[in-house]
Amino acid sequence: MKTAVISFTVDGDKTAEKLLDALCGMGHETERTDACSADTDTDTFSLEAWTKKQFAEKDALIFVGACGIAVRAIAPWIESKTSDPAVLVVDDQGRYCIPILSGHIGGANALCEALSDALSMTPVVTTSTDGHGVWAVDVFAAKNGLVIEDTALARQISARLLRGETITLVAEGGRIDGAVPPQVNIVSGADAPDVYIGIYRHPAWPQTLHLVPRVLVAGIGCKKGITAEEIDRSVEAVLKGEQIFPESLAKAATIDRKKEEEGVLSYCRQKDLPLVTFSAEELKRLPGEYTASDFVEEVMGVDNVCERSAAAEASADRIRRRKTSGGGVTVALSEAEWSVDL
């Protein structure tokens, strides 16, 4: 986690040093700025410019000083609770720690609790679900790496829980670990649940909050000289046809003879997907039945690339879409095993 700390007084500098030590102990990559230091040119230093830069680069910002300073500094740069960094305020005496932005998804509340424990500060957490001790769906999603498809529905779930209502939850294709929180019922998914965890869209469930795990493997085969755009169109068409969220994509897989194929590499860069490759011998040894092609076997040394590659990174029994061909690209999809911790 990348964290920036800024202080404004002599006492604040001392507190900032303690925060820095604690953050480093937690494994944070930290940057510290003393706005009142002799090393800082106060005539040219701009808090607005500093905040803009840190908002773009850091996962968390900590202001050691008054809340008003922090609020005014961050106000122009706030965009969305799904993308804004965590922002905390610590008084210059190091007595109180207050998360003021991205408490749940950004992790400000969790960081506040961790720093308060480390430095014997009093945490001042004001989010309603924390104050009432109810399950927070956005914290759950962030902790488990799930994509929230509709933040408005997430707020509705929190509001219902705060009113004392019970909500239903289903995980399709994954395992649920941990103690089930009060007011949460795990169901099979025969009817529309309040919260769905999985890779599939369910258009018939418009009031269901969809949480998407990043667990899908795209097995890719292609002709020489294929472009990233052609691969993208093929993969997107398969995802759309299967009603699968594109956000569920976690990796791309192919045969090692394609590991230098520029179109494949460019596609993975554009989608921020790791590329895993396998030799023909590794793919041939896989158990299971696959869509065979004599031509592919003659050229590649194995009868199928996309399905076998997808299965090699997940398993044959978790293939979600068999080989689809078109435009010089073959695509298959598999779902890696996954779980969530309540």
Image: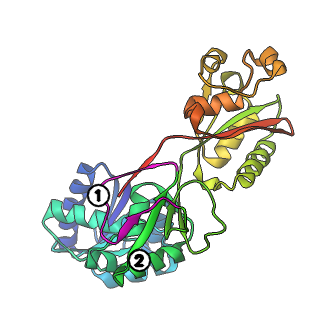
Camera-side residue of 85 and 66? 85
User: Label 1: which residue?
Assistant: 179
Residue 135 picture location, percent across and down = 34, 70
User: Label 2: which residue?
Assistant: 158
In the displayed structure image, the side of residue 55 where residue 39 appears, left or right: left
Q: Is residue 287 above or below residue 136?
A: above
Q: Residue at x 51, y 79 (%)?
A: 76
Is label 1 or label 2 in front? 1
Quadrant containing the C terminus in the rendered view: bottom left
Please count the marks in the image.
2
> Identity of the amino acid at label 1?
Ala
Return the disc, 1 or 2, that comes first in the chain's sequence. 2
Q: Residue at x 29, y 80 (%)?
A: 126
Name the secondary structure under disc 1. loop
> Identity of the amino acid at label 2?
Ser
In the displayed structure image, the side of residue 84 where residue 333 appears, left or right: right
Instruction: Examine the rendering and report whether any part of residue 162 can be seen.
Output: yes
